[in-house]
Image: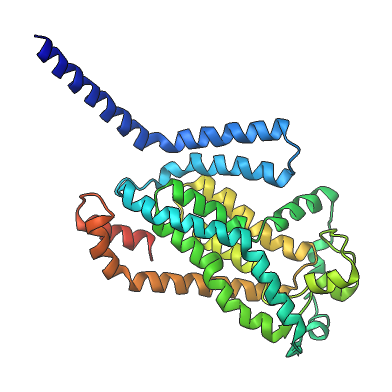
Amino acid sequence: MSRINHKEILRTIKVILAKGLSLLNKYYFIIIGLYLLKSAVNTALHSDAGVGYKAYLFLLAFASFTAYSELRKDVRWIPYLALAIPFLMFISYINNNGYHFWGKMLSWQMSKSVVIDLNPIFRKIPFNDAAFLRIYKPETLTWFLRIVYNNGFVLPILLPIYRAAVSKDFKKMLRYGLSGHIVQVFLITPFYLMFHLQEVWYVLGHPDGLARNLSPQAAAGVALNCFPSMHTSIAFAAFLLVIREKNRLFKYVWGFFCLSVIFSTMYLEIHWVIDVLAGLVLAYCTVKLVDFVLDKGKGLLQRILRSYYYKNIPSTYIGNYYTNYLQ
């Protein structure tokens, strides 16, 4: 009798564990979101951190809660983590060390002779300074757009990558990373090495729109590399990918942020109108290039991922997924 009870107890425990794991697998994004929301509230109430960092924590919670529309239930956890963790470590390394490498490139560039100086050309083009966007310039809007611009180089891509990670969608993480920074750096660097163009406020002799209190020597270096606008190209690449998302709330909120980054570059007299237009073109071409590369690898990926990455699902589902999300 005791042996039967023992078996029943074990069976009951297994059932409970299975149901618990099933619920955890279904609602884990809520747990992550609640933890991040708690951290964000505590930081907002008890920390001296800047407004940008506090807002970032709330945005992480927001991204977690809105990930439910994108959850990949057809993906195995272990193969996913084996791909996602190294990729996130790589993104973290770029985030922490990218500006250092970028600074080295700027130093090298400043030591070379200028190939084409665009400063005198751009300042003579009508409406190129985007002054028409600064007719109404309240302090609150300026404060907001400074925060947007200061976070506009990394955050437009970083938050969707995090959200894709919560959604268990490695291919989307890869798409955002390639389209936003990794491929763009290689495409934009030749322009920065070939053209000399400085920020609008510096060329026109106006106050720095970001109020950075730079010395004349520091300003000359910081205000370099405007054509094309990489703030614009990164934000617009993120926008083009964000509008593909299922969740409307995330799509509208983050799409607005990405477009605000583009607007801020002109409102704060950082980039010329032509810089922004060139950045839009660069972003569009980069996204299409990444789409093309991933689409070409679709056949090989299907065979490999069907065996190791996906759960036991019909191959037609994978084909439909590629059709709907990878093109």
Quarter containing the N terminus: top left
Give the residue at x 19% y 17%: 9
Quarter of the image holding residue 188?
bottom right
Number of callouts = 0
Q: Could you say which is closer to the camera, residue 100 or residue 26?
A: 100
**Residue 110 position within the rendered picture, expressed as x and y whole percent measured from the top left:** 76, 81
Q: Residue furthest front?
A: 3
- Residue 129 in view in this figure: no
Position above or below: 99 against 88: below
Q: Is residue 57 left or right of residue 168?
A: right
- Residue 213 in view in this figure: yes
Position above or below: 221 against 10: below
Please say which color scheme the image uses.
Answer: rainbow
Q: Is residue 185 left or right of residue 75?
A: right
Give the residue at x 51% y 67%: 179
Give the residue at x 71% y 58%: 149
Give the residue at x 72% y 57%: 150
Quarter containing the C terminus: bottom left
Position above or below: 310 against 1: below
**Residue 228 position within the rendered picture, expressed as x and y whole percent measured from the top left:** 66, 76
**Residue 162 position within the rendered picture, expressed as x and y whole percent measured from the top left:** 51, 50
**Residue 197 position within the rendered picture, expressed as x and y whole percent measured from the top left:** 76, 79
Q: Could you say which is closer to the camera, residue 11 or residue 172?
A: 11
Q: Residue furthest top?
A: 1
